[in-house]
Image (cartoon, rainbow, N blue to C red):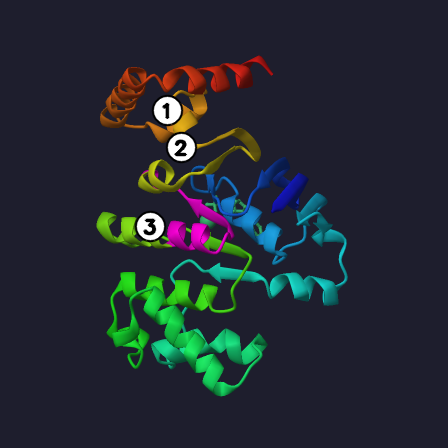
Amino acid sequence: MIELQNIRKGFGEKEILKGVSTIMEPGKVNLIIGSSGSGKTVMMKCIVGLMNVDSGKVLYDNQDFTAMEEKEKKTIRQEIGMLFQGSALFDSMTVEQNVMFPLDMFGTGTLKEKKARVEECLERVQLKEAAKKFPAEISGGMKKRVGIARAIVLNPKYLFCDEPNSGLDPQTSLLIDKLITELTKEYNITTVINTHDMNTVMESGDHIVYMYQGQKQWEGSNKDIVFSKDQKLNDFIFASEFLREAKEMRQLEMFKDGKWREQLKKEQGKEGK
Ligand SMILES: Nc1ncnc2c1ncn2[C@@H]1O[C@H](COP(=O)(O)OP(=O)(O)O)[C@@H](O)[C@H]1O
Ligand SMILES: [Mg+2]
């Protein structure tokens, strides 16, 4: 579990995060959404410690990460897997060497065990056949999958993905989302994804934090989002006429299922606060 307590971050005069609090639970795909420039990447960097917060706390399983000495932070970092924007693979290394890299840096065990782990991860992302290829020889979707294999090779408790679907076609995006969701549930990982991909929001959003002008404007699940009356969120999510109609249809469907009652109650409870 990751908990943010009132985190603030600015550059010079400009405040990017104006006191954000939330809880991200294991086994859930936690999304940070918001328009470009809303501070998603800054927030992720603050959570993993690539940037220091100005104030507030980041807790990993109730331990205050922000107050830790460098040595303690290192132990947490070894439990973190990251999928960087654009995959960030090493071009001069083969697929399997890329996945081996974190094991060589931080892993324990014999070479044979490490090789077996690499093979296991490549199999998990269906890339065994591409093991000997170089990044330049494989497609964008395959590169993402190598990035995912590399991110999970050390069995992370926490997985961070910054815009995992950027540059991918919608179908490949869905496959990547599905893979990340499956791994999250399978290994009970606390997964955090920055995205502005609406498919991801609807398909994978167990817990969604909508960022607007440095603050958490709304939070809930992909089921709650259909009933949200938050104008800013709706303008952002259901930006086109088509999506607005789709939203109404989804509401109707849930109305028929009788599921709307609990969702509506939840949303009204929020507005009452
Ligand atoms: N290292 C930095 N120095 C100064 N400003 C930064 C830095 N990193 C990000 N910013 C600013 O913070 C804002 C949020 O950026 P970012 O987190 O990248 O947005 P998003 O990922 O939501 O598109 C932008 O206005 C950006 O210019
Ligand atoms: Mg970004």
For label 2, the residue is 222
Measured along the vertical axis of the image, is residue 226 above or below residue 46?
Answer: above
Q: Position of residue 118 (x, y in %)?
A: 41, 75
Between discs 3 and 1, the one toward the N terminus:
3
Mark 1 residue element? loop
Q: What span is in magenta?
A: 180-198
Q: Residue at x 43, y 81 (%)?
A: 115
Residue type at the position of mark 3: Lys
**Closer to us: mark 3 or mark 1?**
3
Residue 166 seen in this snapshot: no
For label 1, the residue is 226
Contact between marks 2 and 3 (CB within 8 A): the answer is no
Residue 101 seen in this snapshot: yes
Between discs 2 and 3, the one toward the N terminus:
3
Magenta stretch containing residue 189, yes or no? yes
Relative to 250, is 118 on the left or the right? right
Residue type at the position of mark 2: Asn
User: Disc number at residue 178?
Assistant: 3
Relative to 101, is 107 on the left or the right? right
Q: Position of residue 49 (x, y in %)?
A: 63, 56
Measured along the vertical axis of the image, is residue 73 above or below residue 241?
Answer: below
- Quarter of the view holding residue 17: top right
